[in-house]
Amino acid sequence: MTETILFFFVQAARIGFIFSLLTHLATFRNMNLQEEFPVVWWLHFGVFFVWIPTVLLGFQIARLSGWKRIVTILKNNTPMWLGVLLMLFLLYASYHFYIMTNTVNPANIQATQNSMVRGYSAHWPAFYLLSLTFLRAVKKDLIDEKD
């Protein structure tokens, strides 16, 4: 049962990552995604859909086995390339947060809307990938414990 639930959230995080990355790339085409595709904001809520179970699972593991167990699970079940990719996305999201908060121009609403969508959409792949990385590692750890 637990593996099935983890599989569901891993797939949701994977799909969210792909669509959020595509959305972020689309913001560089100077289209107003907020007006043309308002459904894009569902990706914002989708982050919480996968993030809340990730955090709850992390707290549960920490409560039962300690925080070092989380580090061990991630270290043993995450490929190096995925860890590096995650760090790059987190740095990129931080950079875009800085840009978003320092380039808001109330005089130009269109540019401000594009800047906001670009800023938020830079965070979405990072959070989806963080959930994906953690949930995938926990799922792999559960399967390895059974064997």
Image (tube, grey):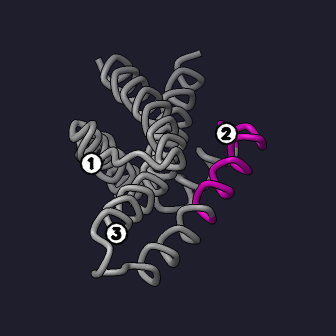
> Who's the residue at 32% across and 51% down the image?
60
- Label 3 or label 1, whichever comes before in sequence order: 1
Specify the quadrant that holds the N terminus.
top left
**For this view, does 99 lie left or right of residue 46?**
right
Whether residue 134 is in magenta: the answer is no
Classify mark 3: helix, strand or loop.
Answer: helix
Q: Nearer the viewer, mark 2 or mark 1?
A: 1
Q: Do the residues labelled 2 and 3 touch (CB within 8 Å)?
A: no
Q: Position of residue 105 (x, y in %)?
A: 36, 80
**Hey, what amino acid is under mark 1?**
Gln
**Hey, what amino acid is under mark 2?**
Thr
Q: Give the labeled residue for mark 1.
A: 34
Q: Do the residues labelled 3 and 1 touch (CB within 8 Å)?
A: no
Q: Give the labeled residue for mark 3.
A: 112
**For this view, does 90 lie left or right of residue 102?**
right
> Who's the residue at 43% across and 32% down the image?
19
Dot 2 crowding, Cα within 10 Å, few <14, some 14–19, many 20+: some
Classify mark 1: helix, strand or loop.
Answer: helix
Give the alpha-carbon distance from disc 2 to disc 3, as whole Å.
Answer: 38 Å
Q: Give the labeled residue for mark 2.
A: 78
> Main structural element of the magenta stretch: helix, strand or loop?
helix
Toward the viewer: 128 or 65? 128
Toward the viewer: 70 or 9? 9
> Would you place residue 69 above or below residue 4 in this image?
below
- Label 2 or label 3, whichever comes before in sequence order: 2
Q: Position of residue 110 (x, y in %)?
A: 31, 62
Magenta part of the protein: which range?
Answer: 76-91
Dot 3 crowding, Cα within 10 Å, few <14, some 14–19, many 20+: some
